[in-house]
Image: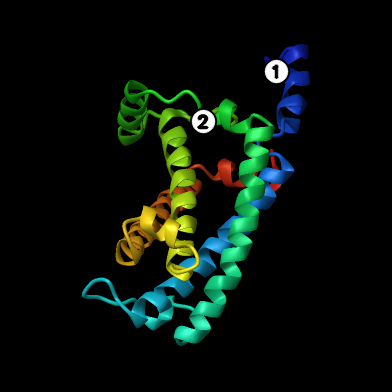
Amino acid sequence: MSSLTASDEHSIPAARKTVIQPAWVRLVHWINAVAIILMIMSGWQVYNASPLFKFSFPPSVTLGGWLGGALLWHFGAMWLLMVNGLIYLTLGFATGRFARKLLPISPSGVLADTKAALTGKLSHDDLSKYNQVQKLLYTGIIIVGVLIVLSGLSIWKPVQLQWLTALFGGYDIARYVHFVCMAAIVAFMVIHVALAVLVPKSLRAMIIGR
């Protein structure tokens, strides 16, 4: 005989219908993913034309074929990322999602959840709530996203936006800031994809919302 009570039976369909990721979050997430991938691959081709360090990216992971082509892809994806990012930030603040999902963050909480994650004891039962590590990563990547756009604009229009370029310490430093932000985004994406593989129901929630 089943051990489920009547209330349990009613709670199962209700749980399945609970929306974890609203439609607008899912839409901007996937648009953002496409835009970032296009920007990274085209950005690597742009980097190869004038490297900051003693290495270049292999052609197989770049986009554009040459500097001119890469810049076209980069600028096209830039507008997509900027518009989509502004929509995300506006709705995130207006709906109170950022306050609910990303706050509060405490150093002790981050350390405790990091230790739990490294020992395989971090729970993923409730996907509607972010743990302290997720809060820190998602808040950090939002800040990095703003920095990479601003540093990119200062590199793109160093004369017209000379005040912005000056805030970064000049054109050359702005390039390094842009590169470091790119590296941070790539690292975030690797962790993000790895966690989606380890916790597949989180990927399902980002696709169908539940």
Q: Residues within 10 Å of mark 2 (few under 14, many from 20)?
A: some
Q: Which structural element holds mark 2?
A: helix
| Residue 107 visible in the shown view | yes
Quick one: SS at disc 1?
Answer: loop
In the rendered view, does 70 fall on the left or right side of 107?
right
Coordinates of residue 171 in the picture (x, y in percent): 35, 66
Q: Is residue 151 visible?
A: no
Q: Which residue sits at x=52%, y=72%?
A: 74
- The mark closer to the camera, 2 or 1, is 2
Count of numbered circles on the image: 2
Q: Position of residue 83 (x, y in %)?
A: 65, 56
- Crowding around mark 1 (Cα neighbors within 10 Å: few <14, some 14 to 19, many 20+) is few
- Using the numbered discs, state the Cα–Cα distance from disc 2 to disc 1 in whole angstroms: 39 Å
Closer-to-camera residue (193/146)? 146
Where is the N terminus found, in terms of image quarters? top right
Q: Where on the picture, by quarter, is residue 76?
A: bottom right
Residue 122 position in % (x across, y down): 41, 29
Q: Tell me which residue sits at (32%, 21%) in the image.
A: 108
Q: Are marks 2 and 1 in contact (CB under 8 Å)?
A: no
Residue pushed farthest left? 54
- Compared to 39, does 90 lie above or below? above
Please name the amino acid that badge 1 sits on: Ser
Determine which residue is flagged by label 2.
102
Quadrant containing the C terminus is: top right
136 with respect to 124 (left or right): left
| Res 12 → quadrant | top right
Among the two numbered marks 2 and 1 on one chain, the one whose residue lies closer to the N terminus: 1
Q: Which mark is residue 2?
A: 1
Q: Position of residue 56 (x, y in %)?
A: 30, 77
Q: Position of 182 compared to 55: left or right?
A: right
Three-letter amino acid code at the position of disc 2: Leu
